[in-house]
Amino acid sequence: MYVEMGWVKFDPNGFWTPAFERWGYPAWLRLLVGLIETAGGAMLIIPWFASYGATGLAVVMIGAWITRLNDGRMVDVTWISAYLAVLAWIALEWWGWRRPRLRVGGRRSDLTPRRS
């Protein structure tokens, strides 16, 4: 979903160009948002990068939430809130995936923290 929604933001004749203009945002911001959405969406499917992708997407979604709130589109605010909750969960859940684990008895232990 994020890859597709980010990709269409690169189209200068698409829906998002006049929308960003109406909201008073510069053209470069539309392209930056598209880049973050496309890259972040792709990162969600790679476990080692999922937390980074979810964090980047959450930042973009906070901006979208504020924009839609100021525009009076409460249904969009509700949906964006749900997306934000899922992205926060992904970011926090996958963050531990990269945490080093201490090997106990030749096996990987998820319960014992690594000591320096």
Image: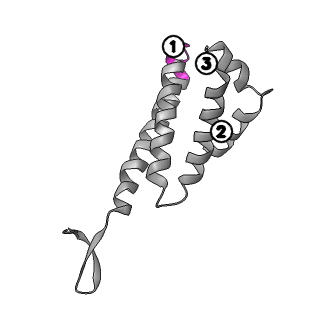
First of labels 2, 3 by sequence position: 2
| Quadrant in the picture for the N terminus | top right
Residue at the spot of label 2: 6
Residue at the spot of label 3: 25
Q: Can residue 105 be seen in the rendering of this structure?
A: yes
Q: Residue at x 44, y 43 (%)?
A: 55
Locate residue 113: give its quadrant.
bottom left
Locate residue 88: give its quadrant.
top left
Q: Can residue 1 be seen in the rendering of this structure?
A: no
Query: Marks 2 and 1, Cα distance to the nearest angstrom?
Result: 22 Å
Q: Amino acid at mark 2?
A: Gly
First of labels 3, 1 by sequence position: 3
Q: Position of residue 109 (x, y in %)?
A: 26, 75
Q: Position of residue 59 (x, y in %)?
A: 47, 34
Locate residue 13: give its quadrant.
top right
| Quadrant in the picture for the C terminus | bottom left
Asked whether disc 2 touches disc 1, contact meaning CB atoms under 8 Å apart, the reply is: no
Q: Position of residue 95 (x, y in %)?
A: 37, 55
Q: Which residues are magenta?
A: 69-75
Q: Classify mark 1: helix, strand or loop.
A: helix
Q: Nearer the viewer, mark 3 or mark 1?
A: 3
Query: Marks 2 and 3, Cα distance to the nearest angstrom?
Result: 16 Å
Residue at the spot of label 1: 70
Q: Is residue 110 magenta?
A: no
Q: Classify mark 2: helix, strand or loop.
A: helix
Q: Is residue 74 magenta?
A: yes
Q: Residue at x 32, y 62 (%)?
A: 99
- Crowding near pointer 2: few (<14 within 10 Å), some, many (20+)? many
Q: Residue at x 18, y 69 (%)?
A: 115
First of labels 2, 1 by sequence position: 2
Residue 38's tag is none
Q: Classify mark 3: helix, strand or loop.
A: loop
